[in-house]
Image (spheres, coloured by chain):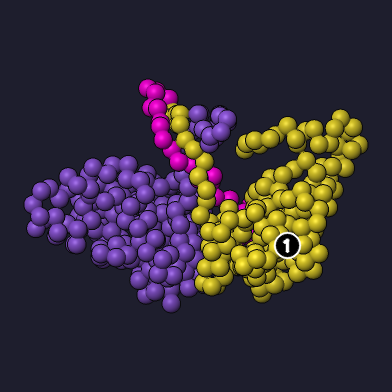
Chain colours: A purple, B yellow
């Protein structure tokens, strides 16, 4: 597994061993939301609870070299925007689909973090019977919320007709569900799905 | 959309306009199975029947340049093996998951076309209540089959204990389901799902 900013994992806890232990056990400081979710999904997979994967980053490949006796090298490619959400899979017979976003904002979640075609995708998923939601982390508060897609739509469509360009933190705190941080299954969102959909 | 071997689309039908028309209307010659499935999925999406996407090709990105005032360029990357199947999504409340493979073999489908971790993934999908299958095209016969994952597993596990390394064409013809080729929804596999799972 790759940690693009792996050095943060070390520096976050400093050199105090007691603090190191606290950070490892009770905090997610220094891990990105994506790392936490990937590790949670890996735990779900290995414990046979659910099959949920992050989709690969969509890339437009322009040029590939095929050197003799070694692997093909992509020498020119560009990042493409995804037309769906980043994560999907299967849990207890249900199709599960979500997007994960981290914000440094203290007071609200800016809707600019998501794209219109992603919201259209989420609307279709809900319509066809899937479990669909956002995982939103407020980095400053060190809080991670499960926010059902159905509760996102009114805010999204509201901003298109002159409403606010963000969802206030209080709303996410009230209408969403705090996902407790824990050692294994660090972001245990299946627990929230159990409560809401079964 | 990119066609890595786009030239085949033109050359397949040659320059005879009558033949060109026949090819366009009644045959899939010259179109890859992936093209056909992508176009089918697009039709399903636009007609609001199902939400099924091909996952992006997994790529290990090693080096990216960020030129001033233009898009980031990936200058070194490598193809990675996928740990799942290529297609998944949602249809009539059900999680749908499949792999598509084309073979030039006339008499059998070589199991080397799929990988062990893909079969393990398919086993997990079936266990957790998903609809899981292979779409197998015999290019020479111009026939495309829906082959349920449950029927693949005995052959896969058989080859691991000394059994045949391929599934005979007759078996796929008998135990699988021919997907008729048509103009819209060229590979209309949802029709087979309707019959088998509802």
Vertical placement of B62 versus A49: above or below? above
Image location of residue B196, percent across then percent down: 70, 72
Image quadrant containing the C terminus of chain B: bottom right
Image location of residue B119, percent across then percent down: 57, 62
Residue lying at 65% horizontally and 53% vertically, measured from the top left:
B113
Q: Does residue B121 belong to the magenta stretch?
A: no
Judge whether residue B65 can be spotted in this image.
yes
Q: Which residue is at the front of the view, B19 or B116?
A: B116
Kindly give the residue lying farthest to the bottom in the view shown.
Answer: A198
Image quadrant containing the N terminus of chain B: top right
Vertical placement of B180 versus A78: above or below? below
Residue lying at 80% horizontally and 56% vertically, measured from the top left:
B107
Kindly give the residue lying farthest to the front in the view shown.
Answer: B162
Vertical placement of A196 versus A119: above or below? below
Stretch in magenta: B43-70
Image location of residue B59, percent across then percent down: 49, 42
Image location of residue B38, percent across then percent down: 65, 48
Q: Does residue B59 belong to the magenta stretch?
A: yes
């Amino acid at each position: 597994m790759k940690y693009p900013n792996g050095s943060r994992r070390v520096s976050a806890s400093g050199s105090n061993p007691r603090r190191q232990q606290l950070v490892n056990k009770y905090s997610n400081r220094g891990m990105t939301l994506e790392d936490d979710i990937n590790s949670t999904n890996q735990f779900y997979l290995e414990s046979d609870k659910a099959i949920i994967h992050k989709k690969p980053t969509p890339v437009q490949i322009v040029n590939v070299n095929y050197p003799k006796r070694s692997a093909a090298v992509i020498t020119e490619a560009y990042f493409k925007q995804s037309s769906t959400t980043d994560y999907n899979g299967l849990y207890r017979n249900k199709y599960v689909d979500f997007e994960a976003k981290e914000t440094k904002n203290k007071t609200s979640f800016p809707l600019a973090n998501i794209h219109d075609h992603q919201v259209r995708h989420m609307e279709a998923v809900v319509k066809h019977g899937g479990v669909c939601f956002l995982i939103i982390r407020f980095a400053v508060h060190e809080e991670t919320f499960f926010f059902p897609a159905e509760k996102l739509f009114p805010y999204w469509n509201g901003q298109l007709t002159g409403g606010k360009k963000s969802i206030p933190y209080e709303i996410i705190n009230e209408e969403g569900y705090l996902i407790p941080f824990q050692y294994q299954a660090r972001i245990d969102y299946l627990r929230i799905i159990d409560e809401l959909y079964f």
